[in-house]
Image: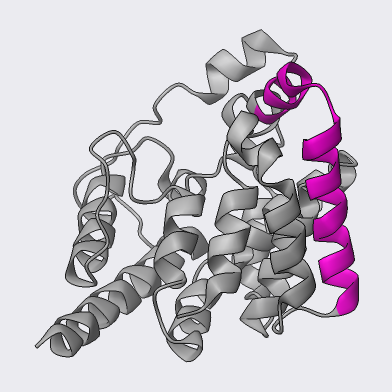
């Protein structure tokens, strides 16, 4: 069990009264955490203080503005790899299977690649396994952190903590591929409509699978299958 990931999952959840009321418990958990250094804990505490002190409707509006209306900040991991293309489906199936093999129940309306859910799963795994899986998504984590820093968002603290926990650096090739993707302006509704249109899917000999993002998903799915087999073995 690695409770640090559960803590970060909670901090990335949609802000509501329950989250604000749990501020004291969250601050205590941050102070007692042994995996994050003082600087990371301090920045997480600042995020908790903000959630506890700001107007709830303002917090919710900001959250939606960042993570729901801004595709480049989406908390759905595979959104950054394949968007809405059909290739995302099998990756979802693999990820859900890994969760179920480990005994994690997934509610019907929650997509498996939702980052808070992924972190909740990592919290159930030994730290070495959790770090290995986290590293498969590190280029996504880093790209989102960079974009949040650019916006001056305190949510960047969560992604900084995840980078620290991974204890690794993302592949420069994979990270650069994400850096080249458009960084949406949620206020530009016309541009958002264009960005959310499903990209055409190419079949046959002309289809290419050589881009860094697709290679990354192949590695992630292979890691997921391996973890699923391990979890099944543990269950036996």
| Residue 197 x/y as whole percent | 45, 21
| Residue 176 x/y as whole percent | 69, 61
Residue at 37% x, 35% y is: 84
| Residue 26 x/y as whole percent | 70, 56
Is 169 above or below relative to 67? below
Is 61 above or below relative to 149? above
| Residue 144 x/y as whole percent | 69, 51
Tell me where residue 109 sits by quadrant: top left
Q: Is residue 50 magenta?
A: yes
Q: Give the image's coloring scheme.
A: one colour
Q: Quadrant of the N terminus?
A: bottom left
Residue at 66% x, 78% y is: 165
Residue at 55% x, 25% y is: 195
* Magenta segment main secondary structure: helix
In the rendered structure, which segment of residues is drawn in magenta?
A: 38-63
Residue at 45% x, 68% y is: 216
Tell me where residue 98 sits by quadrant: bottom left
Q: Residue furthest left?
A: 236
Query: Relative to 49, is 36 on the left or the right?
Result: left
Q: Quadrant of the C terminus?
A: bottom left
Residue 59 is at least partly visible in this image: yes
């Amino acid at each position: 069990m690695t409770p640090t990931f559960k803590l970060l999952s909670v901090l990335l959840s949609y802000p509501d009264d329950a989250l604000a009321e749990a501020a004291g418990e969250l601050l205590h958990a941050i102070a007692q955490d042994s995996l994050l250094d003082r600087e990371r804990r301090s920045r997480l505490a600042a995020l908790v203080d903000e959630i506890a002190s700001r107007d709830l409707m303002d917090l919710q509006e900001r959250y939606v503005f960042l993570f729901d209306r801004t595709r480049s900040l989406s908390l759905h991991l595979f959104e950054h790899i394949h968007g809405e293309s059909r290739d995302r489906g099998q990756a979802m199936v693999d990820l859900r299977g890994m969760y179920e093999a480990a005994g994690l129940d997934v509610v019907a309306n929650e997509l498996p690649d939702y980052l808070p859910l992924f972190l909740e799963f990592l919290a159930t795994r030994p730290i070495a396994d959790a770090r290995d899986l986290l590293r498969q998504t590190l280029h996504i984590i880093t790209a989102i952190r960079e974009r949040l820093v650019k916006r001056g968002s305190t949510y960047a603290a969560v992604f900084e903590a995840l980078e620290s926990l991974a204890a690794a650096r993302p592949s420069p090739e994979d990270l650069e591929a994400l850096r080249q993707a458009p960084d949406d302006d949620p206020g530009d509704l016309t541009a958002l409509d264009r960005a959310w249109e499903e990209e055409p899917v190419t079949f046959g000999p002309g289809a290419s699978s050589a881009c860094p993002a697709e290679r990354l998903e192949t590695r992630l799915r292979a890691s997921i299958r391996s973890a699923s087999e391990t979890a099944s073995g543990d269950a036996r």
